[in-house]
Image: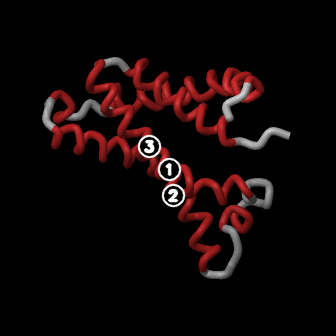
Amino acid sequence: MFTRERFIQFLVYIPIFALFFLLNNAKIFGHMRQERASGNSVSSLMICWLKNAFVMAGGVFLMVLVEYIPFFLDIGPGADLLFSSTFGGPFMSLMILFIPQIILFSFLCTYINRKTGHVYVSAFTVASLACWIVTGGSAIF
């Protein structure tokens, strides 16, 4: 349940999520001016979305490869081997779960940005959804 306590937690986290998605969307939609972005067809939406998803999920995917390739080779978690156990642990094991969320969020960002023409609307909408997922599903002790 999204209780009062979770709502307060949501209010604490939303500025961080909003800042991240605002900077992320400004980079993607502001600096990656795509030729097909002005088209209204479904194919132009899909091409822009795939490019945006690659940009948004690319870094996380590389982190997942660094973590899981040594793990599946029975060497150990990659972050623990390369850095220290401080950077490994549960956070790195959850990184693989972020990829489907990022792909969905990149589609929402692309669609909303194309409909409104503003990075702010897409950034704050997706930031609210992402923050809601994190605070609604986190453990409270």
Give the total of numbered labels: 3
Residue beneath disc 2: 62
Circle 3 residues within 10 Å: few <14, some 14–19, many ≥20 = some
Residue beneath disc 1: 59
Circle 2 residues within 10 Å: few <14, some 14–19, many ≥20 = few
* Circles 3, 2 touching at the beta carbon (< 8 Å): no
Say whether residue 16 is left or right of residue 46.
right
Q: Quadrant of the C terminus?
A: top right
Secondary structure beneath disc 1? helix
Secondary structure beneath disc 2? helix
Above/below status of 4 relative to 99: above
Q: CA distance from mark 3 to mark 1?
A: 7 Å
Q: Earlier in the sequence, mark 3 or mark 2?
A: 3
Above/below status of 128 relative to 53: above
Asked whether 40 or 76 is in front, the reply is 40
What's under tag 3, amino acid-wise? Answer: Met
Circle 1 residues within 10 Å: few <14, some 14–19, many ≥20 = few
Q: CA distance from mark 1 to mark 2?
A: 5 Å
